[in-house]
Image (spheres, grey):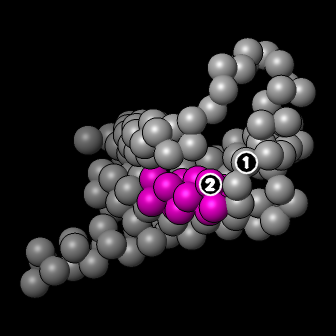
Amino acid sequence: MNPTIKAILGVVAAGITTFVVIAFSELAMGTMYPAPHINPEDVAAINAYLSAAPWHMFVLIAVSHFLATTAAGWVGTRITGKITTAITIGIVFMVFAGQNIYYYSGHPGWFWATLVVYPLGAYMGYLFASKRADAVKS
């Protein structure tokens, strides 16, 4: 397969993996921390909800996003065999998460530090995939 197409396929598959894992984890968190019906365009209401949310909800969000990018790093690496796929997906999602935290100012200040979970998770996925590939080869 053409390396460029393989790289694009790896990043797209990793991105889809991230979205699926985050969607399921946030669906599960919705049962633990049900949100009131808020208009998605009402930024003030979203910020008020986030400001009143318990700190452990944000910890669970960070953990679920770490697991999602770990899975994405694994999928991307299994497809392309290269670390660049995992790092690309980690950086892309870190930028998106940073924009989200900036836009919705109701996040606690310490939540900015969780941006590190995206590249770290993607790198962990790369390590898991490359170790599995090494084990299969030997």
Q: Specify the label residue 53 is tagged with.
A: 1
Which residue does the numbered mark 2 point to in the structure image? 57
Give the residue furthest to the bottom.
138
Q: Is residue 81 left or right of residue 34?
A: left
> Within 10 angstroms of label 1, few (less than 14), some, or many (20 or more) residues?
some
> Within 10 angstroms of label 2, few (less than 14), some, or many (20 or more) residues?
some
**Occupied quadrant, residue 119:** bottom right
Type of residue at label 1? Ala
User: At 83% from the left edge and 26% from the top edge, which residue is drawn?
Assistant: 45
User: At 64% from the left edge and 47% from the top edge, which residue is drawn?
Assistant: 92
Q: Could you say where residue 84 lies in the image, as x and y percent from the top left?
A: 51, 60
Magenta part of the chain = 56-69
Given contact means CB atoms under 8 Å apart, are the residues at marks 1 and 2 in contact? Answer: yes
User: At 77% from the left edge and 37% from the top edge, which residue is drawn?
Assistant: 49
Q: Could you say where residue 131 lies in the image, as x and y percent from the top left?
A: 27, 78
Type of residue at label 2? Met
